[in-house]
Amino acid sequence: MKALALLLLPSLALAAPPPSRPQRIASLLVPMDPTAEASGPKMESYMNEALAEFQNFTLRKSEDLFGLPQDDEALVALKRGKQGYEESLAAFDKKEYEDAELKIRATLKELQKAASAMTASCNPLCDATALYAAVMHQRGDVEEAKLALLDLMALNPTHELDTKRYSRDFIAFRVQVATGVHAALRGGATVKSRPAGARVFIDNEFKGYTPLTLSTLPVGKHLLRLERPGFRVYGQLLEVSPDDVEASTALQPTEDYKAYDARLDGVASEVMRANVTSSTAVAGLGKALGLERGFVGTVRDIPDSGTTELVLGLFDMSNGKRLGVRRVVLQGDEFGQLKSEMGRLVNHLLNNADGGAEKRVKASDPLENSHGMDEWNGEDRGGKRRDQEKKAKKGDPLEGVNGTEDW
């Protein structure tokens, strides 16, 4: 028996438990009215930023769950546009200006359909616009060349012209246009989508979420791209003039998003009920999306008050058990406060989840008996931040003290 025990002990010592896989977690907000559609995606993005600080979760963003497919027609148009530009450039370098003009006009028409696919830069559209301006200048059509250069500066004011390819006269003309009165003109644009809440990119720079009004865009053409997870990417060339313009489109959903959307009514009704400790609808959603944990909530705009009501629950999505819940009224995002508020909600629910107990705001006013500094200073932000803060402390007795604790 002793010999047998000696043989078994080494094998038992080597049998270590397998490392636990980080739980997959996501933020999912259900809009309860059309106006709440606009705020939901922004709030989800802020929650995801807070979740990224926690090491024991694998964050699944909405684009991971529902996809963010490119427009296939735009990709094909971009490929044809690149080829057309190369052919136009070859004709221009050979001084075959009539052939270059025919080719570059056709190329620009093709590239108008490729707006959503030019995600890294404005090329080849900027290069093609510069070439078209040079061809028009060579032909003596100064006004057309000026309009093309204004479009080029609207798309990318720092676009460089190849001094070996273009004449000194044309480059000097570009400087003249850039310092002229027309280059200083600005216009406004309103961008809308159905559903609202799409990310708006102007010339590949993120500007906000639809519906969005931009008031100081340079006059000329701009690349407009709309992205909303679960919908096909949309793009167009937006022509801005001194008069306000509007761009509006209906986004095309993916099949995964359609299946998700069909579950939302059942999920919302269970999330909003105060006495619910577990939700079969949330469990079904977790199974369909492959999630173990989830922040699931409802968003509703309160009429005539300019506020938004958020009911946010933390769920074990494998069985639908609610681990915590908060109901808060948000005062908008006029001063950029929404990001920090969503971060505090995420941190509070994760750090205080205790296997099912509900965490409620006792009064209808979430700020009652709170002066705004007491809970924030002592908040445990968890995850990576917690580790960083421990390393930062060097025995300084004032570390982490801001002077407001006793107030």
Image (cartoon, rainbow, N blue to C red):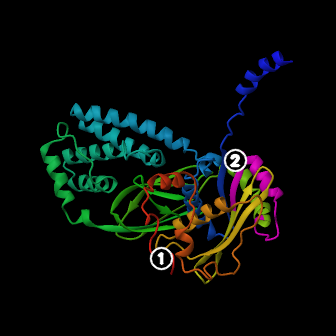
State the residue in front, 180 or 374.
Answer: 374
Judge left or right: residue 369 versus residue 274: left
Mark 1 lies on a secondary structure that is loop
State the residue in front, 268 or 12.
Answer: 12
Task: Name the N-terminal-most of marks 1 and 2.
Answer: 2
Q: Read off the magenta span.
A: 271-296
Identified by mark 2, the residue type is Glu
Mark 2 lies on a secondary structure that is helix
Residue carrying label 1: 404
Q: Residue furthest front?
A: 2
From this view, report whether residue 258 is shown above or below residue 333.
above
Determine if residue 338 is in view: no
- Quarter assignment of residue 70: top right
- Quarter assignment of residue 197: bottom right
Magenta segment includes 290? yes
Rendered location of residue 125, percent (x, y): 36, 45
Residue carrying label 2: 255
Rendered location of residue 258, percent (x, y): 71, 52
